[in-house]
Amino acid sequence: MRKSSDKAERRGGRGLRITVRGLAVLISSMLALGGGLRLGAAELVMLGIIGLTLLFASLLMVAAAASVRSNQITVNRVAPPGLFCGQTGAVFVTVNPCKDLMSGTLTDLTHDGLAASGTKTKTNGNTLQLTYTVTPTQTGHWRLGPLKWQQGDIFGLWLVTWWLGESGQLVAWPRITALPVTDTFRVAPSSAGNAINASPDDVTLRQYVPGDDLRRIHWATTARKGTPMVRQNGGNSKNSVRVLIDPGLMQNGKLREWALEHGASVACSALDAEHQVQIVGGDQCGQTDFIDCQVTGRQQILSQIAQFASLNSAPINAIGAKVNAALPANEPRNSSVVTYAIVGANFAPKPGTASKRNYAVVVGNTASTGQTSAQLRSTGWRVVSLPKPIPHQAAWSEVGA
């Protein structure tokens, strides 16, 4: 009932168009008038004139409705700021004044990624409230509105449309599955560069590197040396987990949502286990490009992945190159950074990435993903190939992380 529109309908905009029935009357009337004049048939001429007169009279009726000053109408929309996919929320749209809208139909435009249903309307004086529910079916940032009002003439020959109010936005977050993060993500004492949660008695200092938790900065030493210094643990600790989602999967309707859910589940589970987490992609760190951005909480993970999902209109090759550039070349085998990648058949790993702490889930048709899996294995990745999406806990178990 409410379909999305990529057209940017401006506030107070309106349009007038002839309907299919009106077009049929116009063509029939013109044929009758032309044929009657050519054949000298007065009845056909009269029939054509009646049809054209009816069209003109109907046009005057809807033109009067289109002349109402719609910019004097106020539209307020209240909606949840965000919902998980499959979760239902209510949207309330208030219109004032509504006296010029009572004879038409009102709908609030929504994106195809939001399943809308259960529309109810009620009036209170000169105020109208439209209520409906939305259930996100896809992760991303989706548009709500503008409000669409339509009215036709009594013969159904013409239709006038208004777009009222501003568009809103609803963020749809991916579903999360809790995954058991094991001690495989532990880091040895010699590679504790990005360690967190150090004991106060077992702390050393080193120079800050991008991705370090800002809460670990030792401000006294930083001020003395003039360069950022961070605390690190000298003993066993937890390392940094980098989650990468191949943007090429965003164009595959069967794999898109599964990849986003799996990446979010890994990131949130690692964060819950007190690992540092980095998401490759998005602009939640204030950047406009794809970067390796450290996150500090579950909400930021969800928001960043939703932002990543909404950028799928950008050229896939350009995005893929930037995502791949975030992977370190010739990363030491005892690196404290774990990379967990969910990729498709067209993902090309950077040569020389040899860390044994790189895990990859290659999802898609086995025939097309075999080469990608072989390339990843040749550069030190632990790879699992999935011909189709499976439950997230089963995929996690297959990876053996």
Image (tube, grey):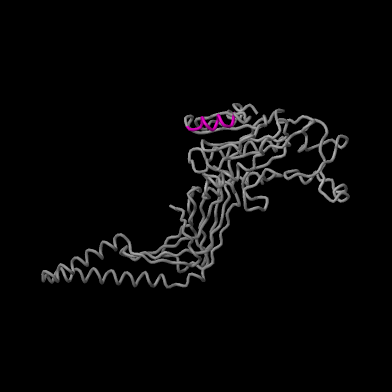
Number of callouts: 0
Using the image, determine if residue 341 lies above or below residue 91: above
Task: Report the predominant secondary structure element of the magenta stretch.
Answer: helix
Kindly identify the residue that appears in the image at 31 percent across and 69 percent down. Answer: 58
Q: Position of residue 70 (x, y in %)?
A: 48, 70
Please, is residue 86 above or below residue 127 in the view?
above
User: Which of the pair 341/162 is nearer the observer?
Assistant: 341
Measured from the top left, where is residue 400 in percent x and y? 63, 26
The magenta segment is 368-377
Residues 262 and 167: in front is 262
Nearer to us in this view, 98 or 253: 253
Outermost left residue: 40
The quarter of the rendered structure image containing the C terminus is top right
State whether residue 117 appears in this view.
Answer: no
**Which residue is located at x 53 percent, y 66 percent?**
96
Would you say 58 lies left or right of 99 here?
Answer: left
- Residue at image point 84% right, 40% down: 205
The quarter of the picture where residue 85 lies is top right
